[in-house]
């Protein structure tokens, strides 16, 4: 399953794993859609049991041999294979971002971090495939997540720990808030004398608040590696804190929109910003 943010040419090989058999096919290399070769191998009942949460591969050696045999029979020089998986074993999630990191390994980390808050299983044990496309508000990620697939005996590059990914996500979210604040400030047209100074005060207050939000959220990341199975209390606490920070981010975005909307009264925007809960209160959950 591809981790590339944007796909280029599609692999020529495809392999479907179902409850009773494994199918594979290869299309021609001339850019067309002609099927050049195909192969299949039946599985014993109970070898593969499609399920989103429980183990899918009840007899992994048999499934591994079937995959190896069908791919070996159709040949092909590429190691990239499209995996076609049972519907019951995969969840598709739409994620919206204002922006994503420029480094590919950080993109996957941020996607996995967002998925961690919405899946009924440990995302570290899942295989994630995603595609990035532009949207009206930034970028949209279409992610397909499957648990306990063909990961045994497979090469799995080491991923950075989740607390590091959480810190990257926190700083990136803070950067997005600062960019939104600067854009709103630049677009503001004063409608009355003295409005500029009032807006400057609100801008400074927002900048300080976002910095505190980032610092506090980074502090909460120390619990990001907690697993729901081995440490449910810490895991639940981390999830609650992240929900708190997400709520504050939404309220901060609303404050940014309101601070630079004419007419601006001196001190009114600063007072509205001061009414926001302190980011550090999220750490008390």
Image (cartoon, helix red, strand yellow):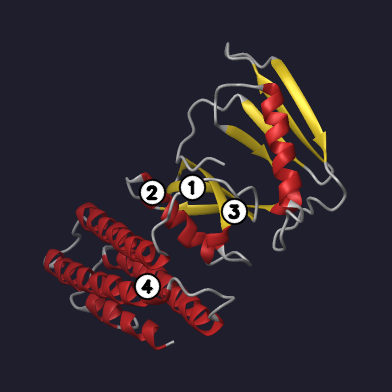
Disc 4 vs disc 1: Cβ atoms closer than 8 Å? no
Question: What is the CA distance from the residue labelled 4 to the residue labelled 1?
Answer: 24 Å
> Which residue has dot 1 on it?
140
- Tell me the element at label 2: helix
In the rendered image, residue 28, in percent from the top left (x then y), is placed at 63, 15
Residue sitting at x 27%, y 73%: 215
Is residue 99 visible in the rendered image? The answer is no
Disc 4 vs disc 3: Cβ atoms closer than 8 Å? no
Mark on residue 30?
A: none
- Tell me the element at label 4: helix
Is residue 102 visible in the rendered image? The answer is yes
> Which residue has dot 4 on it?
221
In the rendered image, residue 280, in percent from the top left (x then y), is placed at 32, 83
Question: What is the CA distance from the residue labelled 3 to the residue labelled 1?
Answer: 10 Å
Residue sitting at x 59%, y 53%: 93
Question: What is the CA distance from the residue labelled 4 to the residue labelled 3?
Answer: 23 Å
> Which residue has dot 2 on it?
105
- Tell me the element at label 1: strand
In the rendered image, residue 285, in percent from the top left (x then y), is placed at 44, 87
In the figure, 275 relative to 97: above or below? below
> Which residue has dot 3 on it?
93
């Amino acid at each position: 399953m591809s981790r590339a943010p944007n796909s280029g040419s599609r692999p020529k090989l495809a392999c479907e794993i179902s409850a009773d058999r494994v199918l594979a096919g290869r299309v021609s290399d001339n850019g067309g859609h002609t099927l050049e070769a195909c192969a299949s191998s039946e599985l014993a009942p109970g070898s593969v049991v499609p399920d989103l949460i429980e183990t899918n591969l009840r007899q992994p050696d048999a499934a591994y041999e079937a995959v190896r045999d069908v791919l070996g029979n159709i040949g092909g020089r590429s190691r990239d294979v499209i995996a076609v998986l049972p519907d019951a074993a995969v969840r598709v999630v739409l994620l919206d971002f204002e922006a994503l990191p420029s480094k590919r390994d950080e993109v996957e980390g941020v996607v996995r971090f967002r998925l961690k808050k919405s899946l009924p299983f440990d995302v570290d044990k899942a295989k994630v495939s995603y595609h990035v496309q532009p949207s009206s508000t930034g970028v949209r990620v279409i992610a397909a997540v499957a648990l306990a697939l063909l990961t045994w005996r497979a090469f799995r590059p080491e991923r950075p720990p989740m607390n590091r990914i959480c810190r990257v996500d926190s700083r990136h979210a803070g950067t997005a808030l600062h960019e939104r604040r600067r854009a709103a400030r630049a677009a503001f047209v004063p409608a009355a004398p003295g409005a500029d100074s009032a807006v400057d005060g609100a801008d400074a207050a927002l900048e300080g608040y976002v910095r505190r939000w980032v610092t506090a959220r980074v502090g909460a990341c120390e619990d990001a590696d907690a697993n729901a199975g081995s440490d449910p209390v810490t895991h639940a606490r981390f999830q609650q804190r992240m929900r708190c920070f997400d709520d504050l981010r939404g309220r901060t975005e609303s404050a940014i929109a309101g601070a630079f909307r004419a007419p601006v009264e001196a001190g009114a925007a600063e007072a509205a910003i001061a009414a926001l809960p302190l980011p550090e209160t999220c750490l008390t959950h």
